[in-house]
Amino acid sequence: MSIQRRQNNIGYSIVVGDGKASDSIVAYSVLDGMGDKILLLFREKDDAERYAIMLNETEPHNYVDYSVIEIDVDVVRDACIGLGHKYTLIETDDLVVPPFVE
């Protein structure tokens, strides 16, 4: 199977903290109906930022700040496939909201 690559395939991901730590970056993911983690990749920075704002507002008791980093979608997708992780690319016309946390 051939994977088509876009030139300058830039996207955005939500991470815990400021995304500038020299150690490791922890990306935000959601659970699907089977309990598997799915990494959210956003095509548009505005969409990722809105989602991060909603996370920061709906999960204040977690004492975690979320931020947005620029990614190369192809690199992240290839890493997910190689490691057996699930991911989804949120396109401009997709509507996603964070899961409700009690």
Image: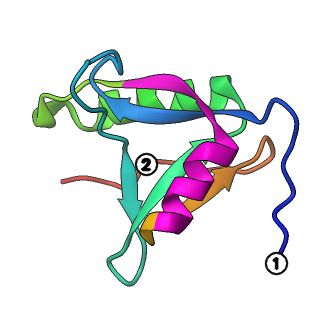
Q: Residue at x 76, y 47 (%)?
A: 91
8 or 16: which is nearer to us? 8
Q: What stretch is highlighted in magenta?
A: 67-82
60 or 48: which is nearer to us? 48
Count residues near mark 2 (Cα–Cα under 10 Å), then give few for <14, some for 14-19, many for 20+.
few
Please provide percent x and percent y for residue 69.
50, 24
Amino acid tagged 2:
Pro
Residue 68 within the magenta-colored segment of the rendering: yes
Looking at the rendered structure, which numbered label has been put on residue 98? 2
**Which structural element holds mark 2?**
loop
**Which structural element holds mark 1?**
loop
Q: Quadrant of the C terminus?
A: bottom left
Q: Quadrant of the N terminus?
A: bottom right
Please provide percent x and percent y for residue 58.
30, 37
Q: In the rendered image, which residue does mark 1 sit on?
A: 1
Give the image quarter of residue 16: top left
Going from N to C along the chain, the mark reached first, 1 or 2, is 1
